[in-house]
Amino acid sequence: MSVAGITSHIFDDASIRGTVKDAFRVKYKESKPRWKMLGFEEDTTNRPWEEYTSWSGMGLTPRKEENQQVVIDVPKQNQTLRVTVYEYALMMAISEAADRFIKNGTMSIRQYIQPSEMLAESVKQTNEILAADIFGQAFSTGSLGMDGVPLVSATHELGRGGTDSNYLGTASFSQSSLEAALIQGDRFKDDVGLQVGVKEGKRKLLIPPEYRMEAKRILKSEKQSNNNLNAINVLFDEDLEVVVNRYLPSQSNWFFVNSGEPQGLFCNVETEAQMRSFKDDKTHTKYFQVYQMIAFAFGLNWRRVQGSDF
């Protein structure tokens, strides 16, 4: 028998712990998390929370008249965002009797391995749902950012007055709507009010599975789809990356994620998902526990995301 490097039928406590943790680690690492495709910036922390502050930049450079003083401009501190990490944990239990039978080789080590793989899958699914829920709450007044509006809003406050929008309205998923989204991004203002557009970087089209085939029809054809006109498809060479995410709560909302815009979506990790074990002598039970401390949040820069709540 060969399981995670263990080649004997007889197991001791150390080999059981190693085998279970190996099985957990292999299952947890076997595929790239889908939430990493959503545009979250992953960072580590050793604090219970991290605090971020946004600043507005400088205005335009004015012409200087001869012998006149140079105009002074000072960056303005805007809002502050605090991202708190939370604990997530789940346990499996096995009796001392079963543990003894596994050690002497009369019960399969799979009695340990299968539940540990289930724990790995559980925490993976949890993180996918936590990340996707940021988009699920993107239009909700129950989930407000530091400027007092949701992640996607028509009234994002600019640092030096005025507002701007990353809301695409209740636009259906269509070629014209995607074109309008690209134009909106190109018209984004910075916190001073200057039209700076989207910073250079991959623009991702984030959609639920229901739009997968329509996205191919819209983006992959050199000619406009669903008509008999000999017109070019202006989206064909826009180099949009399509990200299909099954964890998005809505079957009709869709989003653009502008990867060049920094500090828009956060994933702060204090403790990466890991397997722990301990024994309870009162109940003669051994426990294996998956544990992590993590936070998913939207951040300082709403320009990272555009969305339609169709």
Image (tube, rainbow, N blue to C red):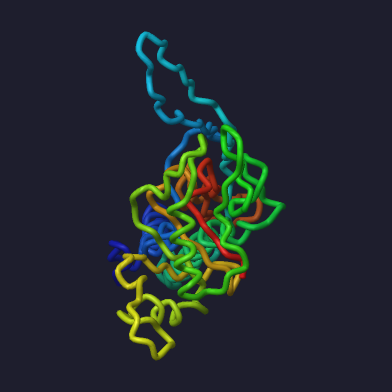
Q: The C terminus is located in which quarter?
A: bottom right
Against 180, is 18 above or below? Answer: above
Quadrant in which residue 44 is drawn = top left
Q: Position of residue 29 (x, y in %)?
A: 37, 60
| Residue plotted at (50% across, 67% down) | 118
Residue in the foreground of this view, choosing between 296 and 254: 254
The residue most toward the bottom is 228
Q: Is residue 127 visible?
A: yes
| Residue plotted at (43% across, 87% down) | 226
| Residue plotted at (53% across, 40% down) | 300
Q: How many marks?
A: 0
Q: Position of residue 297 (x, y in %)?
A: 55, 48
Q: Is residue 112 visible?
A: no
Against 228, is 16 above or below? Answer: above
Q: In the visual, does 125 lie left or right of 242?
A: right
Q: Position of residue 215 (x, y in %)?
A: 43, 76
Residue in the foreground of this view, choosing between 130 and 121: 130
Residue in the foreground of this view, choosing between 277 and 84: 84
The residue most toward the top is 67
Quadrant in which residue 158 is drawn = top right
Against 180, is 290 above or below? Answer: above
Q: The N terminus is located in which quarter?
A: bottom left
Against 229, is 250 above or below? Answer: above
Residue in the foreground of this view, choosing between 158 and 29: 158
The residue most toward the front is 66
